[in-house]
Amino acid sequence: MQRDLQKRWQGLDSTKDRFVLQQPSQLLKQHRIRSKEMIHLMVQAYRLGIQGFSGKFSSANEKLLTLNPMNILSRGYSIAYREPDGKIIRDPKDLKKGSL
């Protein structure tokens, strides 16, 4: 019993001598600094993620714009129709020699 009590007193003495208990304001200051650093890192990661997504979105948008039928026609392409029935010519095999 006496030994157990003595060990506990020694443990209490060593705890009392620790830096944290001597200056708790320093510990709080360190935690605040670390919290600010972590917030800064999270904001940076978020911005990088948004920039990456924005780049991918822009690339996909450009590809879609090139496939837009109105944009294709604005580049000088046309839709050819057969004269007798007005059907769209989808394959050159649908044409007869001299039909144009």
Image (cartoon, rainbow, N blue to C red):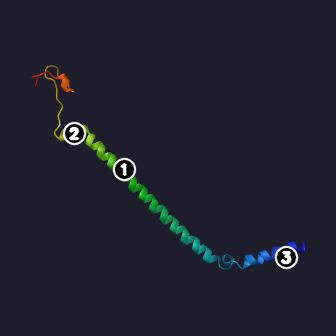
Q: Is residue 13 left or right of residue 45?
A: right
Residue at 18%, 31% in the rendered image = 79
Q: Secondary structure at mark 3?
A: helix
Q: Which mark is residue 56?
A: 1
Q: Splitting the image into 4 quarters, where does residue 87 fall?
A: top left
In the rendered image, which quarter contains the C terminus?
top left
Quarter of the picture holding the N terminus: bottom right
Q: Amino acid at mark 3?
A: Gln
Rendered position, 67 above or below 97: below
54, above or below 72, in the image? below
Element carrying mark 2: helix
Instruction: Give the distance between the C-alpha atoms of the residues marked 3 and 2, in whole angstroms.
Output: 90 Å
Amino acid of disc 1:
Lys
Q: Residue at x 14, y 19 (%)?
A: 84
Q: Badge 2 local density, few (<14 within 10 Å), some, or many (20+)?
A: few
Q: Position of residue 77 (x, y in %)?
A: 17, 37
Circles 2 and 1 in contact, beta carbons < 8 Å? no
What is the C-alpha distance between the residues marked 1 and 3? 67 Å
Q: Nearer the viewer, residue 39 or 13?
A: 13
- Could you give the CA–CA distance between mark 2 and mark 1, rounded to whole angstroms? 23 Å
Query: In the rendered structure, which disc, 3 or 2, sits on the residue that comes first in sequence?
Result: 3
Q: Position of residue 54 (x, y in %)?
A: 37, 53
Type of amino acid at the residue the image marks with label 2: Ile
Residue corresponding to mark 3: 6
Q: Which residue is mark 2?
A: 72
Q: Residue at x 18, y 26 (%)?
A: 92
Image x and y of residue 60, in percent? 33, 46
